[in-house]
Each structure stands twice: as C-alpha cells, then as structure tokens.
Image (tube, coloured by chain):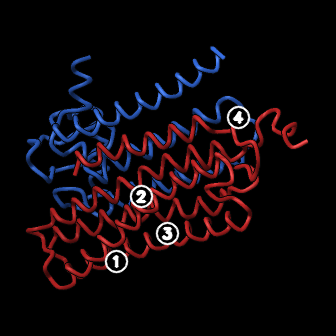
Chain colours: A red, B blue
Amino acid sequence: MWTFLGSDVMFFGAFIATYLVYRGRSLNGPYPSEILNIPVTSVSTFVLLMSSLAMVLGLYYLREGQKNKATLWILVVVLLGSVFMGFQFVEFREFAHEGLTPRTNIFGTTFFILTGIHGAHVTIGVIWMAFLAYSSHRGKLRADNSLDLEIAGLYWHFVDIVWIVIFTVIYLISANDGPPPGAELLHG
Amino acid sequence: MANLWQKLTYHRGNGWWNLPHTASQEPDPPFEGPIGGAWLSNIWRTITHGGVSHAGPGFYWLVGLFLGVITLLEVWLFNLQGLGGLYIPILLGLSALKFVGVVAFFMHLRFDGRLFTYIFTASMGIGIGMFTLVLLLQQFGNQVR
C-alpha cells in the first residue's frame, strides 16, 4: 500500500503542478474569484478530516476486540465520506449552473480534472469502507486480521492529505484570482 | 546532524519527538508521544492514554481537534486582509502541519517500518521535484519569450 501511495503522490503531484502552471491564465470567466465558495468547502474539508479520525478510532476498537464500536466508527467513515461526496456533487452542479464546465476555460479544465480524480478516489474509499463495515458486522473482520482495515485506512488517510493540499492550493490561495492582465482587451 | 536525523527518522529517537523504543517490525509502540521532554510526555500520557500501553482514543481525538483548529485558522486567515506576501507561506505552513499530523499519527508512518518511510518520502521528493521543475521551466520559458 505504501508503494501504491508513493505512486499516487506523483500522480496527484502532476495534476496539482498542472493546475499551478495554468493558474490565472483563463481568458474568459467564470474565474475562481467569482465562483469558489470557501465557507462551504471549509465545512466539507472539516468533514473529511473528521472521517480520518473516525477511521483511526475504528481501527483502534477493532484491535481492542470491540466489534460493535469498530463497526460503528467504520460506518461513520462511510457516512462522512458520503457527505463529502455530496458536497462535491452540489459544488459541481452549482458550477455547471454558473457556466463553469471542464470545457469553459483552462481553470475549469484543471479544476474539474484534479477535484474529479480526487472525488473518484473518495468514492472508491467509501465503497471499500462499506464492505469492511459489513465484514466487521458479520464478525469476519477481527483483531487478528485488522491489517485489512489498516491498509484501507492508509488509503483513506492518503485521500485526506491530498485534499489538505488541494484545499490550500486551489481554494484558499487561488480564491481571489480574477482575469489575467489584458484579458478584457480580447473581449472588446 | 546525524543525531538530529536519527531523532527524526529512527524508532529509537526518544528526543524532543519522544519516540518509543520499539523495533520497526512491532506494529504497536508502547507510547506515541508528541514533542516535548519527559515531563511533558508524562502529562500527555496521562491525558491521552488513560493507562493503556499505546495510543488510545483520547490521543486520536486530540490530533483530530488539532486538525480542525488548523482548518479554522486557515479560513480565518483567508478572511483576514492585510497579510500581503506572508499569506501564501503561512497557508502552506499550516497545510504542511496538517499533512504531517495525518501522516505521522493517523497513518503511523513514524512508527512503521523504515522502508515504508523511505518509499513514501522518496516519492514525495520526486513529486515535489517534478512539481518545482515544471514551475521553473514555465518561468524560464516566459523569460525566453
């Protein structure tokens, strides 16, 4: 899993670098300053961070042999992951409503590819956790094979740390980006 | 320098990171402590571990609280005007703190096998190097034009 995460670091690194290279180069709107909603994304970031906490608590209780508590916390991970996906779905729909799609401008392309790939990772993680919650409930996931949950947990925490970087780079740092100098000349 | 490196990366550190004396193949260290000397680690152990031999729920709740507070601080800084050139470095610093918090304590990297630490940090290094190279090439290309 660590090797996979190492490769995924480079995978996301390439997309984040691409976003930064093209940052502030969209010649037509909507621009980040017109469309990004920091308060809402802060809540979804907090939700994802808390899902990591739930994950580590689930692993702790599984190792302690407390099946019900372990199942409960793994279900909390599934719930919080689903809430995060819900936030992302609403955000994407809102952006499309405002006229920002992957084809609109370079900001739209780089934004949707990066956050979309991250969202796909979260979706895979939620499905994985749902299976593990079921296994824990059925008693098939126990302290002696808790490594299965630990490996899934590593994946989940990784998804969380990638979002920490995305939230800072795309949302907090780029939120005030408007049109580049001279863009208004192109539109008369 | 070698001593500092050992404190930061080895399981036998027990310096201001207060690492446990565990072999790398042992999954559960006896104590996952934060920074601080023996006096702070004893207080921390009492608060977070409640007598159990390794990290308990209290410890994880505190790490979660720390991550939540940093996120709040980031949003507060976003709404705060007048930081100028310090804004981005401060945000990147806070983001790095959260990153390290999750990797070190939730992912247990600091207490896992050294090989995993090397694999992950080497990938991070390559990723950041690639990232920097792309940005430098972009800057260089602009100057040539």
Disc 3 residue crowd, few under 14, some 14–19, many 20+, Cα 10 Å = some
The x, y position of residue A96, in whole percent, is: 67, 65
Q: CA distance from mark 1 to mark 4?
A: 41 Å
Instruction: Of the two numbered discs 4 and 2 on the same chain, state the one appearing first in sequence.
Output: 2
Labels 3, 2: front one: 3
Which residue in the structure is indicated by mark 2?
A: B64
**Which residue sits at x=63%, y=52%?**
A108
Which amino acid lies under the numbered mark 3 shown in the image of this protein?
Answer: Met
Badge 1 vs badge 4, beta-carbon distance below 8 Å:
no
Q: For residue B18, which quarter of the picture? A: top left
* N-term-proximal mark, 1 vs 3: 1
Q: Chain of mark 1?
A: A
Disc 1 to disc 3, C-alpha distance: 15 Å
Using residue A14 as the reference point, say whether residue A181 is left or right of it. right
Name the residue beneath numbered marker 1.
A75
Q: Position of residue B132 (x, y in %)?
A: 47, 27
Say what amino acid the circle numbered 4 marks. Answer: Leu
Between marks 4 and 3 in the image, the one whose residue lies nearer the viewer: 3
Q: Nearer the viewer, residue B45 or A170?
A: A170
For disc 4, the chain is B
Residue placed under numbered mark 4 in the picture: B83
Residue B34: mark? none
Name the residue rendered at 16%, 70% in the picture: A64
Q: Amino acid at mark 1?
A: Leu
- Disc 3 sits on a residue from what chain? A
Q: Which mark is residue A85?
A: 3
Say which residue appears at 52% left-offset and 53% top-offset. Answer: A113
Disc 4 versus disc 2: distance between alpha carbons? 27 Å
**Are tags 4 and 3 found on a single chain?**
no
